[in-house]
Amino acid sequence: MILNQARFDEAICLFDAANSEDPHQEIVDGQPYPKELLYGQRMSACLHAVAPNAPEAVQLAARCQHIRRWTIPRQDFPMDRPGYHKWRNTLKKFHAQLASEILQQVGYDADTIQRVQALLQKQQLHLDPEMQLLEDVICLVFLQYYFLDFAAQHPEDKIIDIVQKTWRKMTPEGHQLALQLPLAPEAQKLIGKALGGGE
């Protein structure tokens, strides 16, 4: 339930305004869109489909999950596993800080802001049902919109490993939803291989 619709709408508008500055574009139906703006909108749409009554903090966190992500590029960190984890942890803190500034600006209370920050930093994953809901949505959006392009850039064994890791992050409900996604045959084949022929 949204306690103050005008405040919520203003926060979403500011999140979208920040992501509209993404210089990277994605073409959808022949039209270019800033990539992170589109990602945030897809996150909100997926969350609404999966859990239309999701708590306000989860809805906010879904929309700003990748806020201004392009400003901290992967190549600024060592191209190894520790470098990847350092990049991801740096991003989480950056997203949480930027979200906090916007939420303060529109008048959210400290408890809500701290909750959004905790969700963005994936604290207590597997122990926190709301965090787990957000993680399911993150994984579903990845599989539906980004998996096939990602798979085209990497060898099959790495893709299978990524799918298996993604699957472990999700709930049984998330698994069922993932298997119902309208995926391309190539994506379905890779996921089937990763899952040993299916669920």
Image (cartoon, rainbow, N blue to C red):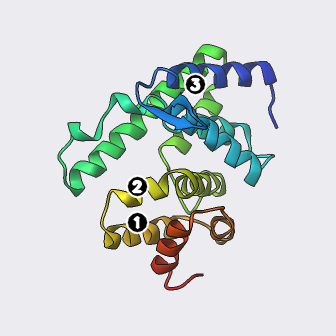
The residues tagged by marks 3 and 2 sit, at their Cα atoms, a distance apart of 25 Å
In the image, residue 72 above or below residue 58: above
Q: Is residue 20 visible to us here? A: yes
Evaluate if marks 2 and 1 touch, with contact meaning CB atoms under 8 Å apart.
Answer: yes
Residue type pointed to by label 1: Ile
Q: Callout 2, which amino acid? A: Phe
Residue at image point 65% right, 25% down: 12
- The correct choice, above or below, for 163 with respect to 44 in the image is below
Q: What element carries label 3?
A: helix
Q: Name the residue under label 2.
A: 150
Q: Residue at x 65, y 57 (%)?
A: 129
Q: In which quarter of the image is the C terminus?
A: bottom right
Whether residue 56 is situated above or below residue 141 in the rendered picture: above
Amino acid type at mark 3: Phe
- How packed mark 1 is, by other alpha carbons closer than 10 Å (few <14, some 14-19, many 20 or more), is some
Query: Which of pointers 3 and 1 lies earlier in the amino acid sequence?
Result: 3
Judging by the rendered image, the residue that carries numbered circle 1 is: 162
- Mark 3 vs mark 2: which is more N-terminal? 3
**How far across and down, in percent of the image, does residue 112 sit?**
65, 32
Residue 1, x across and y down, in percent: 82, 38
Is residue 116 visible in the rendered image? The answer is no
Closer to the eye: label 3 or 2: 2
Among numbered discs 2 and 1, the one appearing first in the sequence:
2
Instruction: Classify mark 1: helix, strand or loop.
Output: helix
Q: In which quarter of the image is residue 111?
A: top right
- Please report the residue visible at 47 percent of the width from the left and 72 percent of the height from the top: 190
In the rendering, which numbered label is found on residue 15? 3
Foreground mark, 2 or 1, reads 2
Classify 10 Å Cα crowding around label 3: few (below 14), some (14-19), many (20 and above).
many
Q: Which of marks 3 and 1 is in front?
A: 1
Specify whether 151 is left or right of 2: left
